[in-house]
Image: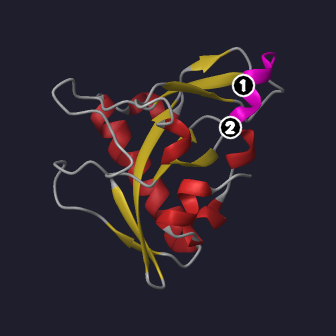
């Protein structure tokens, strides 16, 4: 049994993933802010100098072939879809592979709504489209960018 299988709910796993993200960011000397309760559209705020980025944190253990499927939509059906007016960056964590992907929200929300993505930290993806997010693996330097930088960022 893997440690992440000990969580009894997705909410517990999600809260743990948020803590892991905050610890990783803090270890890189970013100031971390956590909004009170689960009412906001983002999970964690990151301060860097004058910048403040809103980060939505997602975790996955769902293995599909050589990668992991990560749901980038709000978990609660009653919540409105994410928008770039609310989120600057997505942080996706492939838990079994201990791999982080920091992806500008504009990349995920380019079609107007969030969807599932494939992240492939353990094997070369068979489908060329799956390479799309590999350039964001461990891209912690994106936390130093401004909101406007992230809108126009290309790796």
| Left or right of residue 39: residue 65 | right
Q: Quadrant of residue 75?
A: top left
Q: Coloring scheme of the render?
A: secondary structure
| Left or right of residue 42: residue 22 | right
Q: Position of residue 65 (x, y in %)?
A: 71, 14
Residue at image location 71% in from the left, 33% down from the top: 132
Kindly check if marks 1 and 2 are in contact, taking CB atoms under 8 A apart as contact: yes
Residue at image location 28% in from the left, 36% down from the top: 11
Q: Which residues are magenta?
A: 126-132
Residue 115 higher or lower than 80, as above or below: above
Q: Position of residue 21 (x, y in %)?
A: 48, 56
Q: Is residue 76 visible to us here? A: yes
Residue 128 higher or lower than 105, as above or below: above
Q: Quadrant of residue 76?
A: top left
Residue at image location 31% in from the left, 52% down from the top: 86
Is 97 one of the magenta-colored residues? Answer: no
Inter-mark Cα distance, 1 to 2: 7 Å
Q: Is residue 91 visible to us here? A: no
Q: Position of residue 147 (x, y in %)?
A: 47, 64
Seen as rendered, the residue at the extreme bottom is 49
The prevailing secondary structure element of the residues shown in magenta is helix
Mark 1, secondary structure of its residue: helix
Circle 1 residue: 130
Q: Position of residue 96 (x, y in %)?
A: 61, 34
Circle 2 residue: 133
């Amino acid at each position: 049994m893997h440690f992440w299988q000990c969580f009894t709910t997705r909410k517990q796993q999600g809260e743990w993933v948020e803590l892991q993200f905050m610890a990783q960011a803090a270890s890189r000397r970013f100031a971390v802010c956590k909004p009170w309760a689960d009412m906001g559209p983002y999970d964690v705020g990151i301060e860097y100098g004058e910048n403040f980025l809103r980060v939505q944190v997602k975790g996955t253990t769902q293995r599909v072939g050589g990668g992991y499927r990560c749901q980038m939509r709000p978990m609660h059906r009653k919540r409105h879809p994410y928008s770039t007016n609310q989120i600057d960056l997505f942080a996706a964590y492939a838990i079994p592979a201990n791999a982080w992907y920091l992806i500008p929200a504009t990349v995920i929300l380019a079609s107007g709504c969030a969807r599932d993505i494939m992240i492939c930290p353990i094997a070369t993806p068979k489908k060329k489209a799956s390479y799309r997010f590999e350039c964001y693996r461990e891209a912690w330097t994106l936390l130093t960018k401004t909101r406007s930088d992230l809108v126009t960022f290309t790796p």
